[in-house]
Amino acid sequence: MKGIFDPENRFWRWVDRAADVLVLSLLWSVCSVPLITIGAASTALYDAASRCVRGGERTPYSRFFRTFRAEFKTATLSWLAWGGGMTALLASHILLLRSAQGSPAPMALSMACLVLAIAAAGVLCWLFPLLSRFEYTFGGLNRTAVQFLFAHLPSTAAMAALLALAADITLQLVFPLCFLPCLLALAHSVFVERAFRGHMPEQDSSSSEET
């Protein structure tokens, strides 16, 4: 019976992690309400999820807010650039698709907009993990994210698909916002951390890099 109440018991560790998933997801949802802050919230969420929920470090909530404040400017500018572009491309895709009426030119433009929107989503999948782990200028961050997009196309495709699925679920149902953001960050971390290790085999993954 004593083991049941031991805070280091495996059961309680899983309870703690489940609680962290819920709280971090809610923090991301609240901090993303203004929409322009989604980039900073996503950077903070990935940092806390990968280091604390997955990596076992302590104080995930203080890490979330520390990263949110530290990377706010670069994350926000990057989100406005790529998130805004993705939204505009998706809107153009829908409008062209509706007006095409079988005409090949609008259909081709519509598909081109969709492909570019998916590419923008792929860049976003790398942007915030990179910013959460390393120090970048705005230009350096965006160049590196584009490089990762092409260098890890299968991982990018998988992360973009997971992002699209999560977005579709939350657009239909609200309650998944209580847990889905952190679960998505953890799922992305499987691909991201593997890519990070591949590019820096001799370095500690927690080190910082100037770009």
Image (tube, rainbow, N blue to C red):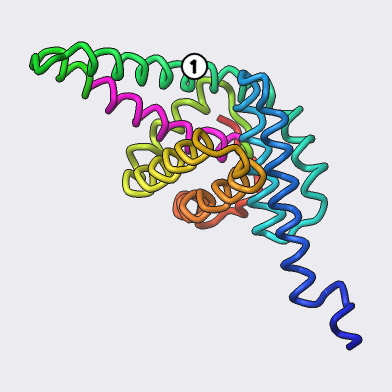
Q: Indicate the quadrant where residue 71 lies.
A: top right
- Which residue is farthest front? 173
Residue 186 in view here: yes
**Relative vertical location of residue 175 with respect to residue 106 in this rendering, above or below:** below
Q: Is residue 90 above or below residue 118?
A: above
Residue at the (32%, 14%) spot, across then down? 92
Instruction: Using a 10 Å C-alpha cutoff, classify the residue at mark 1 as few (fewer than 14 neighbours), some (14 to 19) or many (20 or more).
Output: few
Horizontal relation, residue 166 to residue 206: left or right: left
- In the displayed structure, 11 sits above or below 38; it is below
x, y percent for residue 15:
76, 65
In this orientation, which residue lies closer to the viewer: 56 or 112? 112
The rendered magenta stretch, by its main secondary structure, is classed as helix
Identify which residue is drawn at 54% across, 56% down. Answer: 202
* Count of numbered labels shown in the rendering: 1
- Looking at the rendering, the stretch of residues picked out in magenta corresponds to 112-131
Location of the N terminus by quadrant is bottom right
Quadrant of the drawing holding the C terminus: top right
Say if the magenta span includes residue 78.
no
Answer left or right for 145 relative to 24: left
Asked whether residue 126 is in view, the answer is no
Q: Tell me, yes or no, whether the highlighted magenta stretch contains residue 122.
A: yes
Circle 1 residue? 81
Q: Which residue shows up at 32% across the image and 48% down it? A: 154
Q: Position of residue 205 (x, y in %)?
A: 60, 52
Q: Position of residue 171 (x, y in %)?
A: 50, 33
Q: Does dot 1 land on a helix, a strand or a loop?
A: helix
